[in-house]
Amino acid sequence: MSGTLSEALLCLLLFFISVLTVVAWAVITKSTYKVLALAVAATAAKLLLILANEINRILPFKPDAEIYFKFGLELSRADDWSIIIPIYAGKGVNSLGVAAYGVANATFIRLLGESKLYMPILNTTVYSCVILVFLKYLDTLSRKNGLGLSVRRRALFFGALLAFVYPAALSNTVINLRETIIALGFLLFVGELLRYKISALRHPVIYIGAALVILIRPIAIVVLFVSLALAVLIFQVRYKWPILIGSALSVLLGFTIFGKALLSRFSTEVILASVSERAESAAEAFPLDTHYQSLAALLFQMPERVFYFLFYPFPWVASSYKFLIPTVDALFNFALFGGAGILLFMLRSAQNGSESLSWLMRIFIFLFLVCGVGVSFYSLGEPQFGGAIRHRFPFILPLLLCLPLVYEQLAALRVERKRGRLFYLQNKANQARELQPW
């Protein structure tokens, strides 16, 4: 009885610390009261869902989450970690990230006792905080470029709302998975590039973000350096070619540092064998032919793979409750990218040679392309929607958070032009009355 009571008290304490941390970050980032209330409500709801899912599993079972917990549990009981880590982490390119996550699990278990709640609580807290931080990046950019306070506040609120109702974020934060930490690093990396352009390379935060991404999933170094190259091209920075050449050399250096494990990940034999084997053994596999004869055949199928990676499973193929969140997430992605395409077209039309929207146009295109690079890269090696919902999640988030800002700016511009048109017509009518004879 005392053990159950102590576990309940520890759970309540962790819940309180989580909510308090979110409130503290909302204060630090100077979030509005509405965004603060939304962040606290979403965090509290996820924490209750974590507890409910532990008592009576209501979310689809994730084998990786169970493996990570067992990995941490065995590490916490072992005296020699060098024996346990290779069993779970293996020797491949992802071994470093799996090992790091296992060590984090083991540390919590040693400090606080055996429980599956620690990492989901950490994921939920980290997700809420990083959303607030990235919204602060967007708010700073908007203020510097002359957006009104009311427009910024609406954009921040709806951005936070989209982020907290995002189905993939729900399933990836309340379960013991690594993708929330990747999202943290990637949003910090992209946010620094948006705020400081290439000058971000002089700030430590961008390196912290990159280190988190590379630590958890080393192969994502390719996406990071391509994002850096895109920032150089889109934001028209000085010394463009030296930076591009430096980025290319850094990618090669990354391959060299990670050695044969990283290089073997991109060999034709490993990619083709991995995709085919996982697709044939998974009930969640995409309906694609995965018997590739060459890497060129896999690359030729990339558009189709990207489509399924983003929008599968379709509602009519859902056959059990396990398909519920993936199906809702796929529909959410369909609406998201459809809306992004429409807003991009409207932004291009509204710009009309004016520089007032050029900053927002560059940011939106940058985030769109960064999302496309991450999604395309990971679609090559992911043959099932169970993994796709996790792997696409960190790269979609920046674009998702930017959409309300674009919409609110276009809406404000439409109102401003309408007022200007009415003012013009009123002046014209007054001039006509003045010219009329008595």
Image: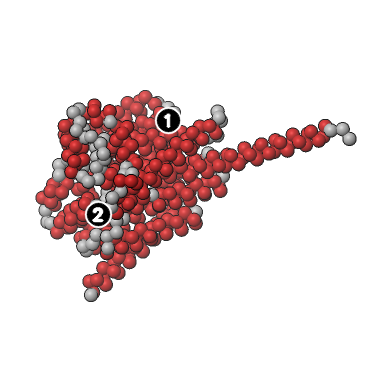
Label 2's element? loop
Residue, disc 1: 234
Image quadrant of residue 69? bottom left
* Amino acid type, callout 2: Phe
| C-beta proximity under 8 Å, tags 1 and 2 | no
Q: Tell me residue 300's x, y (percent).
A: 27, 28
Query: Compared with residue 245, is residue 422 higher up or lower down, i.e. above or below?
Result: below
Query: Compared with residue 376, is residue 89 higher up or lower down, i.e. above or below?
Result: below
Label 1's element? helix
- Compared across the picture, whether 400 is left or right of 245 comes to right
Q: Residue furthest right?
A: 438
Total numbered labels: 2
Query: Compared with residue 124, is residue 182 higher up or lower down, i.e. above or below?
Result: above
The residue sitting at 34% across, 27% down in the picture is 244
Q: Tell me residue 423's x, y (percent).
A: 69, 38
* Amino acid type, callout 1: Ile
- Compared across the picture, whether 192 is left or right of 269 comes to right
The residue sitting at 29% across, 56% down in the picture is 59
Tell me the tag on residue 61. 2
- Compared across the picture, whether 167 is left or right of 96 comes to right
- Near mark 2 (Cα within 10 A), the count class, few <14, some 14-19 or many ≥20, is few
